C-alpha cells in the first residue's frame, strides 16, 4: 500500500470504500487494484451508503471483508442472479458483482448472460486472469490457446479443450446490455482508463439504463509462474491480443 | 375485497396466500405440475406492486430469492421435484446464511425426469437437508387446499421467526385439486424490510451475508447455533393432527395426499366393521416424534402409507423404537394408491 500522510497537503488517502482489513492477495495480483478502483468510484459517486456488493467464489471470496459496504457472498457463479434479487427488491441500491473468469465465464455463464439479456440494472466487475486462481491455477474458459495451466500441462489444445471465450463481445450482442468495456490493469495509464470505464458502468446503473460490465485483464503471477513485473507485462503482451482493450458496447451514445 | 369462502385450485391457494402474507418478490421457472403458480403470480404480483421474475433456471431463481431475502423482504419460489433438486444449492446457502424465505415443492414422481404424476418421494430430500452440510429446512405438509393457503401464510412467519427457509411440501394431487377455501384471515400489506436487510449502510450499520468460515472451530460454533434453532423448532413448532377412535385396532400414519386416501380407506374399513385411526404429521421437520411415539401405547399396529417406496416410515420407526409393529404400504412412480387397496392392506395387517 502507498503510504498516507496527514500533512495539510495530503495528496493520497485510503478510500472510505475499503475496510482497514489487510488483503490476502499474492504480491503482484491485480485483485487489490481492482478493489481499490471500484471502492474509489463508489466513493466519488457518493453512493457508498447505498451500495450492495456480491462476492464470487474465487480468490476474491473474502471481498466482503474488504469493501466497506453491504456485502453478500454468493454461491459459485450465481452472483448475477443474487444481484438481480437485490436490485429488484431494493431498486435504489447500487448493486455490483465482482467475479473471476471461472466464476463468471464457466459455472456462472448462464446467470450473467440472462442478467444482461434482462437488462438488469446492475454492474458486473469481471476479473479475467486467464486461470482459476483460488483452486490452484487450473484452466479457465479464458485460458489462451497454448497456455500452460495445472489442467492443461502441455498447453491449452483447442482440439481438446476449445477456445477462450470473449465474454465482453458475446454479451455485447444482447439488447439488454447497455455498457460493456474491457480494460487492463497492467500500467498506471491502463488503470486510469479502467477507472473511467468503471465510473461509466456505475453511471449507467444510476441512470437506470440497463446492464453494465467492465472486464479487467488481470495478473495471477502465482499460477502463471511469473514475477509481478513479468506478469504485468504479460497482461499487455500475452492477453490483449486475444482480449482487445476498449469500449465494446455503449448504448448511451 | 374477498368473499369469505372461495372455490380454488391448490396452486392458486398458494399464490393467494403469498400475496396475503405480504410476499414482495417471486422468482420461478416453469415445471409441471406447478406451472400455475408462476402463471398466476406473473399477473398477481405486478397488480399488487410486487416483483415477479421468470428466471433462466431453478439455480438462478433460488439465488434471486437469496438476493431478495438478503434485503429483508419476504421472498418466495416454487418448483417441482427435478427443479427442487437444482434448488438445493441455494437452499443450503440460504440456511447457512440464515435468510428467511418460502419454497414450494409440488412434488412429482422420480427419480430422474420421472413423470408429472403425484408422488411423495422427496421426503428424504426435504427433511434431511437436501444439500451438503449440517442443516435443516422447516417442512410443512398440507393435506387440503385450505391448508395450502393457511400453511403458506404461516410459512412466511415461521421463516422470519427462525431466519430459515420454510418448505411447503405439496404434490400434484393437491396442486390441481379444487376445494373451497375460507379467506377470513386479513391480508397483510407488504411489511417494511427487516432491519438487518442488505440495502446499503445508510440504515446505520454494515450488513454482511455470508456462509464462509475458514476456521473449523468458527464454523462448528455456527453449526451448533443453527442446531439450537432446529431444537427450538422441535420444542415450539411441531404440528400434528389425529383422528383416532378409542376402539381403533390400528392406526394409519400418513401426510398430505396419502392421508386423504387413508381417510377414505378408514370409512371403508368402518363399513367392514374395523375401526382404525389416522395420525397425520403436518410438520415433517420438526417431526412429531413424541406424538408418534405415544401411538405405541394406543395401537396394536401402525400402517404407514406413502406415495413412495417408504421414506417417512423410517421416522415412524425411529419414534416408536420397536414398541409396536410398523407396517408399510406405498405406491411409487406417480401411482396414487386407491382407498380400496389401502383398506385391504390395513385389513391384512390386522388379520395377520
Ligand atoms: C460449486 C463449486 N464448484 C467448485 C468450487 C471450487 N472453486 C472455488 S474457486 C474456483 C474457481 C475460481 O476461479 P476464478 O473465478 O477464475 O477466480 P480467481 O480465483 O482466479 O480470482 C473453483 C472452481 C466451488 N467452491 N463451488
Ligand atoms: S492466486 Fe492468483 S488470483 Fe489468486 S490472489 Fe494469488 S495472484 Fe491473485
Image (cartoon, coloured by chain):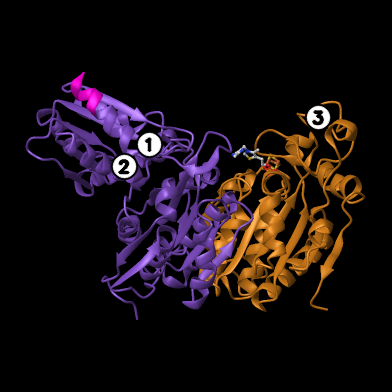
Q: Are marks 3 and 1 on the same chain?
A: no
Residue B209 screen position, x and y as percent: 47, 54
Q: CA distance from mark 2 to mark 3?
A: 58 Å
In the image, the chain rendered in purple is B
- Which of pointers 2 and 3 indicates the residue nearer the eye? 2
Q: Is residue B351 within the magenta segment? A: yes
> Ligand 1 is in which quadrant of the figure?
top right
Q: Are marks 2 and 1 in contact (CB under 8 Å)?
A: yes
Residue topped by disc 2: B261
> Is A189 positioned to the left or the right of A21 in the image?
right
Q: In the rendered structure, the residue with mark 2 lies on which chain? A: B
Q: Of helix, strand and loop, which one carries label 1?
A: loop
- On the rendered image, what quadrant is the C terminus of chain A found in? bottom right
Q: CA distance from mark 3 to mark 1?
A: 55 Å
Look at the magenta stretch and give its main secondary structure: helix
Residue A74 screen position, x and y as percent: 56, 51
Residue topped by disc 1: B337
Residue topped by disc 3: A152
- Callout 1 crowding tier (Cα within 10 Å): few <14, some 14–19, many ≥20: some
Residue B169 screen position, x and y as percent: 39, 47
> Is B302 positioned to the left or the right of A27 in the image?
left
Chain A appears what colour? orange
Image vertical order of residue B346 relative to residue B31, above or below: above
- Which of pointers 3 and 1 indicates the residue nearer the eye? 1
Amino acid at each position: 500500500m502507498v503510504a498516507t500522510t496527514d500533512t495539510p497537503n495530503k495528496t493520497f488517502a485510503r478510500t472510505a470504500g475499503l475496510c482497514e482489513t489487510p488483503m490476502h492477495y499474492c504480491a503482484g495480483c491485480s485483485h487489490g487494484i481492482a478493489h481499490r478502483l471500484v471502492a474509489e468510484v463508489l466513493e466519488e459517486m457518493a453512493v457508498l451508503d447505498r451500495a450492495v456488493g456480491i462476492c464470487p467464489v474465487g480468490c476474491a471470496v473474502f471481498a466482503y471483508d474488504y469493501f466497506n459496504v453491504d456485502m453478500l457472498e454468493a454461491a459459485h457463479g450465481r452472483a448475477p442472479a443474487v444481484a438481480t434479487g437485490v436490485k429488484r427488491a431494493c431498486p435504489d441500491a447500487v448493486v455490483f458483482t465482482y467475479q473471476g473468469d471461472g466464476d463468471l465465464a464457466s459455472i456462472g455463464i448462464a446467470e450473467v448472460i440472462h442478467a444482461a439479456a434482462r437488462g438488469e440494472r446492475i454492474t458486473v466487475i469481471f476479473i479475467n486472469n486467464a486461470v482459476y486462481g483460488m483452486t490452484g491455477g487450473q484452466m479457465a474458459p479464458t485460458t489462451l490457446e497454448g497456455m500452460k495451466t495445472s489442467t492443461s500441462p502441455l498447453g491449452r489444445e483447442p482440439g481438446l479443450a476449445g477456445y477462450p471465450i470473449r465474454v465482453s463481445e458475446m454479451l455485447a450482442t444482447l439488447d439488454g446490455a447497455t455498457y460493456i468495456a474491457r480494460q487492463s490493469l497492467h500500467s498506471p495509464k491502463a488503470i486510469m482508463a479502467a477507472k473511467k470505464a468503471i465510473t461509466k458502468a456505475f453511471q449507467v446503473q444510476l441512470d437506470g439504463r440497463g446492464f453494465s460490465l467492465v472486464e479487467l485483464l488481470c495478473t495471477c503471477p502465482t499460477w502463471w509462474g511469473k514475477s509481478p513485473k513479468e506478469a504485468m507485462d504479460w497482461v499487455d503482451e500475452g492477453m490483449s491480443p486475444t482480449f482487445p482493450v476498449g469500449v465494446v458496447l455503449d448504448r448511451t451514445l | 375485497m374477498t368473499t369469505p369462502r372461495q372455490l380454488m385450485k391448490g396452486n392458486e391457494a398458494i399464490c393467494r396466500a403469498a400475496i396475503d402474507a405480504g410476499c414482495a418478490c417471486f422468482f420461478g421457472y416453469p415445471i409441471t405440475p406447478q406451472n400455475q403458480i408462476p402463471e398466476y403470480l406473473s399477473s398477481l404480483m405486478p397488480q399488487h406492486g410486487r416483483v415477479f421474475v421468470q428466471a433462466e433456471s431453478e439455480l438462478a431463481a433460488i439465488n434471486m430469492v437469496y438476493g431478495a431475502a438478503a434485503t429483508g423482504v419476504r421472498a418466495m419460489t416454487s418448483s417441482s421435484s427435478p427443479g427442487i433438486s437444482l434448488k438445493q444449492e441455494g437452499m443450503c446457502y440460504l440456511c447457512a446464511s440464515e435468510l428467511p424465505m418460502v419454497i414450494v415443492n409440488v412434488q412429482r414422481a422420480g427419480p430422474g425426469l420421472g413423470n408429472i404424476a403425484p408422488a411423495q418421494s422427496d421426503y428424504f430430500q426435504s427433511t434431511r437437508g437436501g444439500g451438503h452440510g449440517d442443516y435443516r429446512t422447516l417442512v410443512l405438509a398440507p393435506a387440503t387446499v385450505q391448508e395450502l393457503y393457511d400453511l403458506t401464510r404461516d410459512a412466511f412467519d415461521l421463516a422470519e421467526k427462525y431466519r430459515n427457509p420454510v418448505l411447503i411440501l405439496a404434490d400434484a394431487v393437491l396442486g390441481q385439486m379444487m376445494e373451497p377455501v375460507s379467506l377470513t384471515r386479513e391480508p397483510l400489506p407488504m411489511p417494511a424490510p427487516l432491519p438487518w436487510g442488505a440495502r446499503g449502510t445508510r440504515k446505520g450499520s454494515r450488513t454482511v451475508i455470508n456462509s464462509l468460515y475458514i476456521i473449523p472451530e468458527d464454523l462448528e460454533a455456527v453449526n451448533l447455533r443453527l442446531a439450537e434453532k432446529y431444537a427450538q423448532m422441535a420444542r415450539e413448532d411441531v404440528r400434528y393432527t389425529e383422528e383416532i377412535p378409542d376402539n381403533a385396532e390400528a392406526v394409519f400414519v400418513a401426510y398430505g395426499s396419502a392421508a386423504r386416501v387413508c381417510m377414505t380407506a378408514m370409512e371403508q374399513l368402518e363399513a367392514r366393521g374395523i375401526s382404525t385411526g389416522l395420525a397425520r404429521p403436518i410438520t415433517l421437520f420438526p417431526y412429531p416424534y413424541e406424538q408418534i411415539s405415544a401411538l405405541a401405547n394406543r395401537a396394536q399396529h401402525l400402517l404407514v402409507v406413502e406415495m413412495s417406496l417408504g421414506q417417512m416410515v423410517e421416522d415412524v420407526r425411529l419414534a416408536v423404537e420397536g414398541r409396536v409393529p410398523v407396517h408399510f404400504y406405498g405406491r411409487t412412480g406417480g401411482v396414487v394408491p386407491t382407498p380400496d387397496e389401502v383398506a385391504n392392506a390395513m385389513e391384512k395387517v390386522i388379520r395377520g
